[in-house]
Image: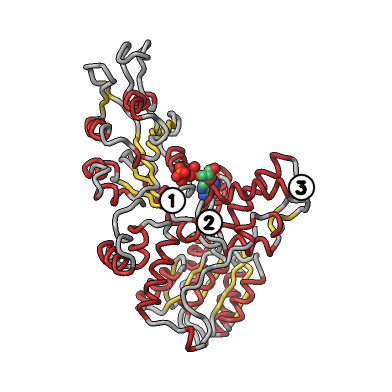
């Protein structure tokens, strides 16, 4: 199979020599003496197998050429030619995205071999990526949609810690996808063949939670006609998610701590301890720091579950992920109900982007469910959206005009901005303080000054 190379060198004689020699070895070479022209060609022509560029050229820095080429065609390897003795520049080029380098004077035999190696290596990498995508679906995270920087950070972290056995704490506002993240980690761990068991600690009555978690022996309490092993043991070989851990009654907390430390549980009414072998994850939409401060959550337990931490950003910090999520839900509901709805109208998309989504992904899902049901068109229109989204106006902190009567003192700007951030953080002061770059005490002091009582530790 013929290879196609793009040669970039401002030295015409060099171009001619290289292309003639490579041609005699079965490589079809196209040359450009202007880097800008070469990049334009690269953009227009998808057929190159390898790029060969000089590093010292007039008009454009060779390093920048490597960077741009790697951006335009990430799948095409870039080889650089560098003057003998300037390895440092070659290293810079590799950092910018080049695959390898050869030094001048060019040994054509070695160059041809290096080009072959680069092409083979890139083809292999592309194949691995293709397979990975085929196995995992688009994006590698079909279950956890998101391409924003914030969500990519979460996806990378998940990849890194999925296989660790340490306890993970997943935090994030309600509806941000904490359970989805727990499942994604389970599915990528070596425990994936084992069960994924979840319990919502807020939904189980206090009197039952201990036996739910740790099991009970027969006759432990009035209703306990038969023994039960409890979720820790039922999750053996798999993962146990303790959802809404912030709601766990104080009385149960020391028992959970002990179980996590000893990796054994004691069933209610029993005397023997039973070992378990499950990975434990915990999730909460509460500010556990505040709960610890208010003594609603034990500090030692907090440290025990917070070994690894995944923090899910709210939807309003995920940019245009809103549209990706909406699209996915539209397709889901349209397929489920056999409706011919394919996506959002541009105006509807604009409204979705402007809205702040306090209910996060769950709110997008509900909103799209309703819109697909309502719409009579192949696209969701603004009219298919709920009034609060249709009519939402982003709140501005600063006055945009230059009418002096509307301008306000700096302290007022600070006050409005802090309240705006606090609102955006759903009232979570730890999060608001982090966004503002303040420590929590300073934030409390400021709130207290404007509104005595507001700086207290009320809710999250
Ligand atoms: N990134 C995502 N990609 C696709 N679906 C998502 C994503 N995040 C959340 N979802 C979906 O949104 C809904 C809410 O997610 P989930 O129940 O995991 O949120 P949560 O943070 O655990 O909520 P809560 O705090 O109320 O327990 C689910 O239907 C879930 O499948």
Q: How is the image coloured?
A: secondary structure
**Quarter of the image where one finds residue 26:** bottom right
Q: Is mark 1 within 8 Å of ligand 1?
A: yes
Locate residue 231, reporting x and y percent: 37, 26
Q: Secondary structure at mark 1?
A: loop
Locate residue 22, reporting x and y percent: 58, 70
Question: Dot 3, how many residues are within 10 Å of its Cα: few (below 14), some (14-19), or many (20+)?
Answer: some
Residue 221 or residue 194, whichever sits in front: 221
For the point 33% across and 36% down, which residue is it?
A: 248
Locate residue 35, reporting x and y percent: 56, 81
Residue 329 or residue 144, whichever sits in front: 329
Residue identified by numbered label 2: 357
> Residue 173 has which mark?
1
**Quarter of the image where one finds residue 227:** top left
**Quarter of the image where one finds residue 268:** top left
Mark 2 to mark 1 CA distance (whole Å): 11 Å
């Amino acid at each position: 199979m013929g290879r196609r190379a793009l040669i970039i060198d401002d030295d015409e004689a060099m171009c001619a020599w290289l292309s003639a020699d490579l041609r005699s070895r079965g490589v079809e070479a196209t040359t450009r003496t202007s880097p800008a022209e070469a990049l334009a060609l690269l953009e227009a022509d998808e057929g190159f197998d390898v790029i060969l560029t000089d590093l010292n050229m007039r008009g454009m820095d060779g390093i920048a050429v490597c960077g741009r080429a790697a951006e335009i065609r990430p799948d095409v390897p870039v080889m650089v030619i560098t003057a003998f003795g300037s390895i440092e520049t070659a290293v810079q080029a590799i950092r910018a995205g080049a695959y390898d380098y050869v030094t001048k004077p060019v040994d054509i035999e070695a160059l041809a071999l290096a080009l072959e190696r680069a092409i083979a290596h890139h083809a292999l990498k592309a194949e691995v990526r293709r397979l990975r995508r085929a196995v995992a679906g688009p994006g590698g995270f079909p279950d956890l949609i998101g391409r924003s920087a914030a969500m990519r950070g979460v996806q990378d972290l998940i990849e890194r810690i999925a296989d660790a056995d340490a306890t993970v704490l997943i935090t994030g506002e309600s509806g941000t996808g904490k359970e989805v993240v727990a499942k994604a980690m389970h599915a990528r761990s070596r425990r994936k063949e084992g069960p994924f068991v979840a319990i919502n600690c807020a939904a189980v009555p206090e009197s039952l939670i201990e036996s739910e978690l740790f099991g009970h022996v027969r006759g432990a309490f009035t209703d306990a006609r038969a023994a039960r092993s409890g979720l820790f043991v039922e999750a053996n070989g798999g993962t146990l998610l303790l959802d809404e851990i912030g709601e766990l009654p104080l009385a149960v907390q020391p028992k959970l701590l002990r179980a996590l430390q000893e990796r054994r549980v004691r069933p209610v009414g029993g005397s023997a301890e039973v070992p378990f072998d499950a990975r434990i994850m915990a999730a909460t939409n509460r500010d556990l720091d505040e709960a610890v401060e208010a003594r609603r959550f034990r500090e030692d337990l907090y440290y025990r579950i917070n070994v690894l931490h995944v923090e899910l950003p709210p939807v309003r910090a995920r940019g245009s992920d809103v549209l990706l999520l909406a699209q996915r839900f539209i397709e889901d509901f349209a397929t489920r109900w056999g409706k011919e709805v394919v996506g959002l109208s541009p105006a509807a998309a604009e409204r979705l982007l402007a809205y702040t989504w306090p209910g996060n992904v769950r709110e997008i899902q509900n909103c799209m469910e309703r819109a697909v049901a309502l719409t009579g068109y192949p696209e969701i229109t603004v009219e298919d959206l709920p009034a609060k989204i249709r009519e939402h106006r982003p709140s501005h902190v600063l006055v945009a005009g230059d009418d002096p009567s509307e301008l306000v003192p700096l302290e007022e700007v600070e006050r409005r901005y802090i309240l705006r951030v606090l609102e955006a953080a759903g009232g979570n002061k730890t999060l608001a303080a982090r966004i503002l770059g303040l420590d929590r005490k300073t934030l409390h002091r400021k709130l207290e000054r404007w509104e005595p009582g507001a700086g207290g530790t009320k809710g999250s």
